[in-house]
Amino acid sequence: MIRIGNASGFYGDRLSSMRELLTGGDLDVLTGDYLAELTMLILGRQRMKDPAGGYAKTFLRQLEDCLGLAKDRGVKIVSNAGGLNPAGLADAIRALAERLGVDVSVAHVEGDDLLPREGALTANAYLGAWGIAECLTAGADIVVTGRVTDASLVVGPAAAHFGWARDDFDALAGATVAGHVIECGTQATGGNFAFFTEVADLRHPGFPIAEIEVDGSSVITKHAGTGGAVTVETVTAQLLYEIQGADYLGPDVTTRFDSIALTADGSDRVRIRGVTGGPPPETVKVCVNTLDGFRNSATFVLCGLDIEAKANLVRRQLEGAIGADGITWTLARTDHADADTEEAASALLHAIVKTPDPARAKAFSRATVELALASFPGFTMTAPPADGTPVGVYRPEYVSSAEVEHVAVVAGQRRVVKWTPGTAVEPRSVGWTDPGTDFGPTRGVPLGLVVGARSGDKGGDANLGLWVRRPEAYDWLVRTLTVDRLRVLLPETAELEIERHLLPNLVAVNFVVHGLLGAGVAAATRFDPQAKALGEWIRSRQVDVPEVFL
């Protein structure tokens, strides 16, 4: 068995997590996931200002506190904190180790950076696990990478530990599932969990650990005495996060999510077994970020009477000052009649401008401030607007692996890592036959009384995974939550392309809502630009639920 704990789910996660994992119990490998589509854009803008930057600097702060501790405990560290400059981060770690007097071998993985791409700020291919495995097999104590798939941070150490072959697809798929569960940190231990009120202690949830065995099966757990919980449902929720259909495509293996079997394995322990896999696809995904003008925003507080008229006035005034082009308006009717507090009597009017002209983005700020004494009664804003920020647009591209050089750099030597031969992966759908069961009388209640949800973003698309708490309710879920019904429950999706994928082994359905988030989080004008709360919205909607399930 190899015991792998993940200390970071995003760039900005809990700073103390590395020390918590290292001191809380046994560990063989500590991973850290710092990269997301938005993070690559942020690092790209940093690199424009400082070509020596482009990596997650908080990772260095954590190592300064924990490098000696990890060395003493014999824990390897693998992280994608290298971002756009893994070689630069590796050099910075060596300098830190020398200053601290800690003798460690530092290696890095590169080759993901595919600039120049037309108009791109960043263009990074998703590398797989074998470069990481090469570094660890060669004796590295710390491996930093650029853009690799999140699960590769777990698959690489497991493959090196067990000596898996390139075509050990079932084992690789099992490790991929384990990596997908722990990649987002405390989302696997009760964070962002639909039924959070049932978690006994969520004040300071522990970070997740995957105990992976030679066949790729695993147990998801956490250190004893830490907060949060690891249950079949917390693991199910994370498995449904940011996926699509039955096949989870990666650069090393195609993982069949309809083969996953989850069982409780004791307190805060969930066993994952039965996962099968096949050859990876022929192409490699590339994360491309481009700059597309500038944006600015303001939120006006409208209190009391005549809310619509107040909103119309400020809209006419602002558009008269800088023009209507590129301004998105959203009126959130949070106000209540005859309210007993001023806040409860107020609505929020959001204005967002997107423009190719930085001067116009800045003029938006002045125009809103100049309305302070000349607009609706009770004029106020939640905060004064800034001068505008660049807009980043994400798009996925797909290239042949032959166009991507995957390189492990160990002890100054560059080792080219071969790609696993890919194959054409045809989309699969899991079938379902309605048994025609009569579930008896129903009652109109919020869907979330019987259904859990986890949602998120993939570029401009939203992912919405839903599962039932009782297996016998699965047929009802599939029968009830069709694509057409989803459009009724979530009117924002009514005109969009929607896919529905069935995962009966997880008693779940997964929806992919194309285009809900426009050009991606950095360019989105939607209230919830990453669709993180989309699942909670649908759980609050009233549906007719069979009383037998209540």
Image (tube, rainbow, N blue to C red):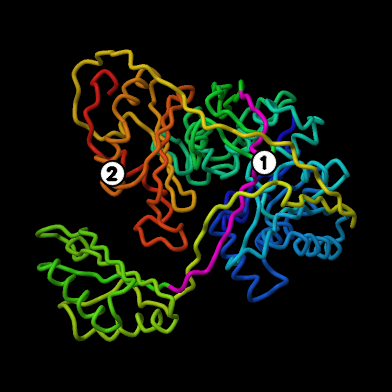
* In this view, 39 is above or below 357: above
**Picture coordinates of residue 542, whole percent (x, y):** 22, 36
Disc 1/disc 2 C-alpha distance (Å): 34 Å
Amino acid type at mark 1: Pro
Q: Position of residue 32 (x, y in %)?
A: 66, 49
* Residue for badge 1: 251
Amino acid type of the residue tagged 2 in the rendering: Leu
Quarter of the figure that contains the N terminus: top right
Q: Say whether residue 88 is magenta.
A: no
Q: Is residue 333 above or below residue 162?
A: below
Residue assigned mark 2: 490
- Judging from the image, what secondary structure is the residue with disc 2 in? loop
Drawn side of residue 212 relative to residue 220, left or right: right
User: Where is residue 37 drawn, in percent x and y?
Assistant: 55, 55
Is the magenta region chiefly helix, strand or loop?
strand
Q: Is residue 291 magenta?
A: yes
Residue 467, quarter of picture: top left
Identity of the residue drawn at 72% across and 63% down: 85
Q: Which disc, if any, is residue 172?
A: none
**Count of all numbered marks drawn on residues in the image:** 2
Image position of 228 with respect to 233: above or below: below
Quarter assignment of residue 332: bottom left
What are the residue bounds of the magenta stretch? 275-294
Q: Position of residue 365 (x, y in %)?
A: 36, 81
Closer to us: 54 or 210: 54
| Image position of 449 (left or right of 238) | left
Q: Residues within 10 Å of mark 2 (few under 14, many from 20)?
A: few
Q: Name the element at disc 1.
A: loop
Q: Earlier in the sequence, mark 1 or mark 2?
A: 1
Q: Quadrant of residue 219?
A: top right
